[in-house]
Amino acid sequence: MRGFNIIDGKFVVSLIRGDGIGPEIIESVLKIFDYINVPIIFEEVFAGLECYNKFGDPLPIETLNSIKKNKIALKGPTTTPKGEGFKSVNVAIRKALDLFANVRPSKTIPNIPSKYDNIDLIVIRENIEDTYPAVEYYQTPDVVQTLRITSKQGSYMVNKFAFELAKKLNRRRVTCVHKANIHKFSDGMFLNTFYEISKDYKDLVSDDIIVDNLCMQLVKNPEDFDVLVLPNIFGDIVSDLCAGLVGSLGLAYSGNIGLNYAVFEAVHGSAPDIANKNIANPSAIILAATYMLKYLNLFDFAYLIEQALFKNFENGIFTKDLKGNYSTSEFTQHLIKNISTYKQVSLNNENNKIEFNDNKNQIEIKDIPVLCDSKDWELFGVDVFIEWNDLRTLPAIPFEYKSLRIDFISNRATKIYPDKISDITLVNWYRCRYLSNSKIDINLIQELVNEIYKNGIRISQLEFLYKENNKNMFSQE
Ligand code: NAI
């Protein structure tokens, strides 16, 4: 039980209309909910570009506080400026509320033209870590760097969530998607955690696949897969691929789920190219809203809306993106008309009680790994990243400093000293690895840094090289 905010027997849900087509498609949901008297009171809050233009803040604290109070939100798409401007509101919300799992079901919808039948996939994307925090640095004026972050705790939470959800929904197989052959540390940790957890789920098939192979297999045989769990960036890409497999981005929906809060939204963005034209497909946000209803145990309301939506498709009522010519509001009116033909569904039956005895969608995660401290780590060297613009010569750095010796120099992560193994096009960003045969004191690195600075060389980054029981805690070139 999450302590939802319930007033007069109705759930209070935070509502963000968003930008672009957001307000138009949210309006469809409001009309449908209103027609069938869903026991929900929406509390409207603001986020996104419009909100930024109006209030000077794309994500006001009141918005987060509202979701924290109500524990649940329905969100329209919000615009993120490209290349400059404020950071993604979606990412900010996910981080602020620790919504670590992004669940994106992709299921064949009858009467939606698509290349495949019988697809029933659930993509579970890690939602906080990886490249998404967008921790980025200019290393030199020509070179930028994005950090890819993976933690044991983050990997545990999303993988455990995937297994728990698969078990609750009686699925058969959970597949971990990764690139651990290349990213041995980050994806390696994600994959190892997956297999560690899988030991507690003997009834489920657990396996793994490299992300590029998955993409090929999904296009060839998507019906082979069941539940996929992925690091953030792969999950982002693969879930759009899955949306394409079942017909359209206009039908793809998701839940951002954490231990305490949940935010439901369409997968698509604010589609500025079709905004304010009354032609957007509201199906994805309607399906996101039905997912939210299921999460709140309001199953009959959810099924009623789903049936009425699918009836639209059966009757050939399509918006422009699906080659139809119905407007957003006409599409919604037809859906509401369909609802009136499903009078046999009782909205007062047991399933719609506001109780939380056996909710399939709310997952508890316990036993998050405790932190291991690094007391056995010993310092053996440092990677010094520098700017060096005379590409014809090696950087004028000391090749030896006390017990430290240059182990290698690389450019664009390709070794150029002592063995130049490639004619790679050089840029002005060099990694100089200094190693000692015995453990060193951090002051030695301070001295080395001063020595390099003396030569007028700008250092952009230092990475300390630790070993634990003689095992390298850093990658080789
Ligand atoms: P987009 O998903 O908004 O649009 C991609 C294409 O799909 C466009 O041609 C658009 O017209 C079409 N489309 C999207 N939703 C549709 C719908 N419901 N009905 C009919 N056609 C639809 O992706 P884009 O253009 O890359 O992003 C636009 C903005 O949305 C950006 O600022 C982006 O950062 C933001 N965005 C926000 C998301 C969110 O709030 N969850 C998710 C993805 C993008």
Image (cartoon, rainbow, N blue to C red):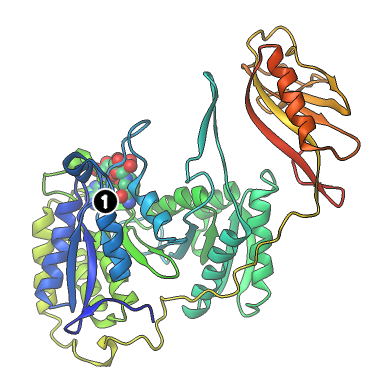
Q: Measured from the top left, where is residue 138 in percent x and y? A: 52, 26
Q: Quadrant of the rendered structure where residue 400 is?
A: top right
Which type of secondary structure does the marked residue at label 1 adopt?
Answer: loop
Residue 148 sits above or below residue 367 on the image: above
Residue 175 sits above or below residue 296 on the image: above
Residue in front for this viewpoint, 316 or 42: 42
Quadrant occupied by the C terminus: top right
Left or right? Give the position of 143 relative to 239: right
Residue 433 sits above or below residue 210 on the image: above
Q: Measured from the top left, where is residue 211 in percent x and y? A: 58, 50
Q: Quadrant of the rendered structure where residue 375 is?
A: bottom right
Residue in front for this viewpoint, 120 or 414: 414
Q: Measured from the top left, where is residue 13 in percent x and y? A: 24, 69
Residue corresponding to mark 1: 60
Image quarter where ligand 1 lies: top left
Residue 54 visible: yes
Look at 68% across and 19% down and name the residue there: 424
Q: Measured from the top left, where is residue 390 in percent x and y? A: 66, 7
Residue 224 visible: no
Amino acid type at image mark 1: Pro
Q: Quadrant of the rendered structure where residue 452 is?
A: top right
Left or right? Give the position of 284 relative to 39: right
